[in-house]
Amino acid sequence: MKLIKTSTLLLTAIAAAGLTFSAVAQSLSSVSSYRKAHADKLARQSKITDRIHLEENQKYARELWENIEPEPDIYTEGWASNLVNPYKEANVPNSKRINVQHYNMPIKQTMVTSHYGYRPRFKRMHKGVDIRACIGDTIYAAFSGRVRLTKYERSGYGFYVIVRHENSLETVYGHLSRFLVKPDQYVKAGQPIALAGNTGRSTGPHLHFETRFMGYAINPEAIFDFANRCTHTDTYLFTKSTYQNARNYSSK
């Protein structure tokens, strides 16, 4: 009996308000649609927020990688040496996978004018590549690391810089006109380190660029695609047997 009276009162109230059952149903439907739309909006906002957080985390990770200093043990063997190759007595592993993902091209020019390899005319190895340059062009660190040498060699490299990197490579930059860094200075990939020149044994302005692993001169074109300004892969597999002959031509 009470349920009947309650229903009657509710119907009377609806009628007094001038509402029909259709209007009430439509109103309830509108509320449901609003709630669904609001829920969809919240879901979209949540996805946007998650994406922003992901991007922020990725940015933080990149900045952390770029600013982290390498472990000190790579700056021990031969660090105080004035030689281009301080690893003559080192126990070099037969193979080593080297991370070359975080790189920068050493110069904006892309034309290789002289390639890596043995030169019968001079009976010696050309242990790097020569890249066309104008005197005063900016030279950049190929990877992050610490400057080991800034030196002058009249009969060879002229003014040159050697940087030892946290990926275990050393890079050599020769025939420079000016140094922009000092020994033991930490540099990031892409940081200016010198200006191109025509010093030492050179027949014209260019950058002589070498990539070395524990004294073994690796063909830079095996790592870098100079024409397209990138690396071929994110990692490079060094094998000692590949470069043993090149090392035997000269211990330098």
Image (cartoon, grey):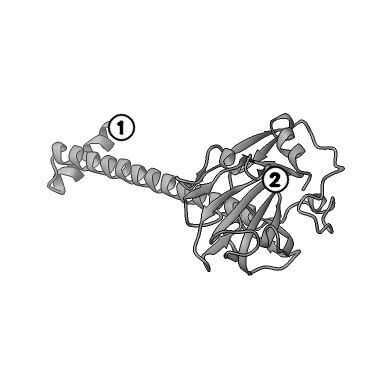
Residue 92, numbered circle = none
**Residue at position x 37%, y 45% from top?**
44
Q: Residue furthest right?
A: 89
Residue depicted at 87% across the width and 43% down the height: 89
**Image quadrant of residue 151?**
bottom right
Instruction: Give the residue type at disc 2.
Output: Arg
Q: Kindly state the secondary structure of the residue where label 2 is placed.
A: strand
Locate the N terminus by quadrant: top left
Q: Position of residue 167 (x, y in %)?
A: 69, 46
Task: Kindly identify which residue carries mark 1.
Answer: 3
Residue 101 makes an appearance in the image = yes
Q: Residue at x 68, y 42 (%)?
A: 123
**x and y, in percent, of residue 162 in the image:** 70, 57
Determine the residue positioned at 50% across, 60% down.
133
- In the displayed structure, 202 sits above or below 232; it is below
Task: Report the side of 29 relative to 89 (left or right).
Answer: left
Q: Nearer the viewer, residue 24 or 18?
A: 24
- Write down the residue under mark 2: 212
Tell me the mark number nearer the camera, choosing from 2 and 1.
2
* Mark 1 element type: helix
User: Which quadrant of the view contains residue 30?
Assistant: top left
Packing grade of label 2 (10 A; few <14, some 14-19, many >=20) is many
Examine the rendering and report whether any part of residue 57 can be seen.
Answer: no
